[in-house]
Image: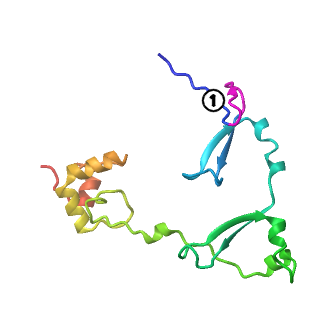
Amino acid sequence: MGKKTIHVSDFSGTVLRPDDEMVRVVVLEHPDLVAGPVRLDATPTEVENIDDAALDVAVVEIHDGRDGDEPRRVVLTASEFDALATDVPMAQLLRTAERVKPPKARKAAEKIDYGTIEHAGKPHRGRVTEEESRIVREHLDEVNKRLADAGLRQIDPADPEHVARYGFDLPA
């Protein structure tokens, strides 16, 4: 038995032949989008006018203290936004305005503690602590099961690199 993959345009439901060109459209934001970005497949002709239909918009954040500390994101047409500037033209205002640094990634703040049973033995570039080595040696089966479940390499107590890294006794 074999399998056959059939590609279908998400926009029109048209079945695409194997030699047809396909375009991937990633929807980043939409009022009906509830669980993050999604991918849609289409034919080039279905999206050829998408650039013509594009709007000139301004995307702004309002930091007014509502909703806790989270800013509100607002999308409006560029002309509506430009009309807010009554003293100086918006183009000039934007050229001379104070630059804002993008927020730093939050991942850097989350430091993984490899000296715990949840993380011991995971591949990492840092130095292996005595606590991590002890956990790996004492709970090798549990650590290897967790690593295998996560699709990571397992620890082999006969591997010279793992012997040196985790302090296993060399086999006689």
Name the one closer to the observer, 121 or 92. Answer: 92
x and y percentages locating residue 68 in the rendered image: 53, 75
Q: Amino acid at mark 1?
A: His
In the depicted structure, whether residue 125 falls above or below residue 44: below
State the extent of the magenta-drawn residues as a range: 11-21
Name the one closer to the observer, 83 or 50. Answer: 83
Residue at the spot x=36%, y=66% of the render?
Answer: 112
Question: Is 13 a magenta residue?
Answer: yes
In the depicted structure, whether residue 4 falls above or below residue 156: above
In the depicted structure, whether residue 106 falls above or below residue 140: below
Image quadrant in which you'd find residue 78? bottom right
Q: Main SS of the magenta segment?
A: loop
Question: Is 116 a magenta residue?
Answer: no
Farthest top residue in view: 1
x and y percentages locating residue 89 in the rendered image: 87, 77
The crowding category of the residue bearing disc 1, from other C-alpha atoms within 10 Å (few below 14, some 14 to 19, many at least 20), is: some
Say whether residue 30 is left or right of residue 104. right
The residue to which callout 1 is attached is 7
